[in-house]
Amino acid sequence: MAFLSQGGQAASSFLLTIVVSRAVDPSVRGEFVLLTLIPQIGAYIVTLGLPGAVMRSVAAEGEHRAPLLGISILASCAAGLVLTALTPLVMSLAHSPSPSILLVFGETTALVWLIFVSWFAFGCEQFILAGALRTVPIFCTLIAVAALDALGHTGLLAMFAPWAGFHMATAAVSAVYFLRRYGFVLPRPAQAFQWISYGIRYSTIQLLNLVTLRFDQLILGWLGTTAAVGLYSIAVSLSEGILLATTAVGLIVFLDSAKEGTGTPFRRKLVTTVLASCLVAGLLALVAHPLIELLFGGRYASAAALTRILAIGTPGLVTLRLVTNRLSGAGRPGTASVYALVALAVTTSLDLILIPGSGATGASWASAIGYNLGGATALLTMRRVTRRRRTGPDPAGSVDLGGSQA
């Protein structure tokens, strides 16, 4: 049920990608991507991973739901202020205009709140509601953008205003619902410190994975062009579709690991998932050009080459996801974060080297290489720990990764 609710958000986001791409050229699409990307990344970074802590605490400490809503509201407003101040800077670095500050503040604060409250709903096991909180504004935006395009209204504001408006409306309705149902209490300082501390420790891997997948688009906007961002985002959107099945398997791996499952099933899951993902990536690479022209239009045809390059990174990215889920489920999120950090460091370094001369192509190669190096690091360490476990107990308390976020 949780996977289906997240799948609805992914489907709506993909449909919005199609509608926006058919309405505007790659340059304007790149500007829209940058604007909407800032709060989606910043919501987790600025709040130090607090949304994840809220979900866990709601599930484990039902009596504290009112103060958890309190800290969610405070964090959303604070993050909204910070990210609103950063938005004009980010857009100016990409040589792009920024909408009015009030519109940006409303959109940013609303989106951060919806992230918090959707994780809150997941913690309450209200899976359909949690998915709807993120899916409804996206779906409404795609309808509005399609209608405006049919009426001849295109451009950055014609896309961003509906996006902001529907997120603000959904945030307002959800705030009324949750506050009336669970109440509102300001958290005690000790509570806030405990939840923030948990968020920092246990959301690091998710933060690193998110930044690895998204930060290169900001770098491409700064060192390249918004048109390059628009093209690259199409390739990213297609290649990330492969990760939907990996997300489901990752949840299973996480739970099996937490239950101290046996070694053979994890190896089987890893090999099967990597092979299946590579097969899908290969098929995507073969049909990339006609598929992109069909869905997004001829002006995005050059994104096909980028999609093929990103497909090369599929085995490393899938391996990285599954091994880090194995470690996180076994209570070793710190070790899991090292692998994600390797992928982030390699990808970012190569972005800075390759993007100035090669643009979106350089960003694609940087991601493919970074994913595979991160996955290879995780796989080699898994084999080393497995051999150590076979020869004797691990004095450092390592987990048998050959045993048994998605």
Image (cartoon, rainbow, N blue to C red):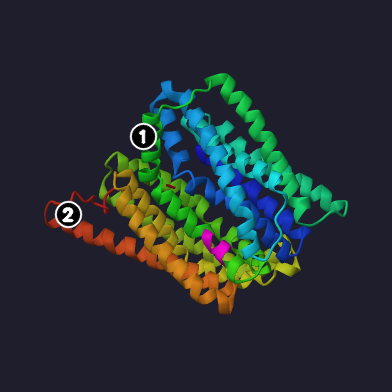
Q: Secondary structure at mark 1?
A: helix
The answer to which of 150 and 279 lies nearer the viewer is 150
Give yes or no for residue 216 being in the magenta stretch.
Answer: yes
The numbered disc on residue 389 is 2
Q: Position of residue 71 (x, y in %)?
A: 48, 32
Q: Which residues are magenta?
A: 215-219
Residue at the bottom extreme? 357
Give yes or no for residue 161 being in the magenta stretch.
Answer: no
Spatial CA distance of label 1 from label 2 is 34 Å
Q: Position of residue 79 (x, y in %)?
A: 54, 43
- Residue ID for mark 1: 194
Q: Amino acid at mark 1?
A: Gln
Q: Is residue 351 in sight in this rendering?
A: yes
Depicted 277 relative to depicted 8: above or below: below
Depicted 339 relative to depicted 78: above or below: below
Give neighbour class at mark 2: few <14, some 14-19, many 20+ (Cα, 10 Å). Answer: some
Q: Position of residue 150 (x, y in %)?
A: 86, 52
Q: Residue at x 55, y 74 (%)?
A: 355
